[in-house]
């Protein structure tokens, strides 16, 4: 490695009549220095692939599908709750075995009363794409998942009562139960994400 060093430099800032004369007197003396890189004598080992040059991966977000009977109460509640409270680790969606076709006012009101938004929610059937792409499927239908879908490691049953047609107080109770379950699921998935990342180290 070489270093070019300026050992003598005369600078002038006078812009008056003597400018040209002063510029003509501007002189440079250069000395060429050669030295060995200091890294050769460093006591620290040189890394072939320094970690600080590695790209930082985006945290994993789990695609979670919430399923209930009509996709009208329980599963859209879970979707809305996860979207607000756990979007750092859950990409939520919802669907129904026999979709009602709309989100009842009682569901929307319960969500709004607790600070959750019903915007974007819709009652729809389970599609092949959303089922296949889900990392985890939460079954809130009240029926055993193995009798509905067969055995699958990515399906988890939540035993939550259906509030459809019931009083607002019961909707509130169900919403609070689902919210607690969603928070617990999010904590579990965050820990799983940490464990998976540590195993790759």
Image (cartoon, rainbow, N blue to C red):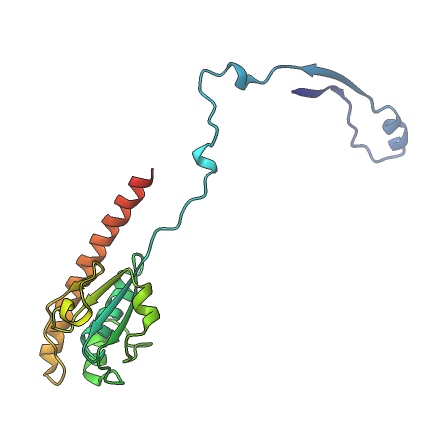
Residue at image position (45%, 43%) is 55
Spot occupied by residue 138 in the image (x, y as percentages of width and height) = 20, 66
Please, is residue 140 above or below residue 7 in the view?
A: below
Please, is residue 64 above or below residue 194 in the view?
A: below
Residue at image position (19%, 59%) is 183
**In which quadrant of the rendered image does the C terminus lie?**
top left
Front-most of 81 and 68? 68
Spot occupied by residue 51 in the image (x, y as percentages of width and height) = 43, 35
Spot occupied by residue 128 in the image (x, y as percentages of width and height) = 32, 71
Residue at image position (29%, 56%) is 89
Please, is residue 157 above or below residue 166 in the view?
A: above
Quarter of the image holding residue 43? top left
Q: Is residue 74 left or right of residue 61?
A: left
Spot occupied by residue 170 in the image (x, y as percentages of width and height) = 9, 77
How many numbered marks have been drawn onto this rendered protein structure? 0
Quarter of the image holding residue 56? top left
Q: Is residue 11 left or right of residue 130?
A: right
**In which quadrant of the rendered image does the N terminus lie?**
top right
Residue at image position (25%, 51%) is 190
Quarter of the image holding residue 134? bottom left
């Amino acid at each position: 490695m070489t270093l070019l060093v300026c050992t003598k430099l005369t600078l002038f800032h006078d812009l008056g009549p003597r400018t040209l004369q002063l510029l003509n007197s501007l002189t440079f003396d250069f000395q060429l220095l050669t030295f060995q890189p200091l890294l050769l004598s460093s006591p620290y080992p040189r890394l072939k692939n320094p970690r600080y040059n590695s790209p930082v991966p985006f945290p994993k977000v789990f695609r979670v599908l919430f399923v209930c009977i009509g996709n009208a109460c329980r599963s859209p509640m879970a979707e809305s709750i996860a979207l607000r409270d756990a979007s750092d680790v859950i990409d939520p969606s919802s669907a129904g075995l026999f979709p009602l076709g709309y989100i009842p006012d009682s569901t929307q009101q319960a969500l709004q009363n607790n600070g959750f938004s019903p915007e974007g929610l819709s009652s729809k059937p389970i599609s092949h794409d959303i089922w296949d792409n889900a990392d985890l499927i939460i079954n809130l239908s009240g029926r055993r998942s193995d009798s509905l879908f067969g055995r699958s490691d990515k399906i988890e049953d939540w035993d939550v009562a259906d509030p459809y047609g019931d009083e607002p107080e019961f909707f509130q109770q169900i919403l609070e139960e689902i919210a607690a379950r969603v928070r617990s699921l999010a904590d579990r998935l965050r820990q799983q994400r940490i464990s998976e990342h540590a195993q790759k180290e």
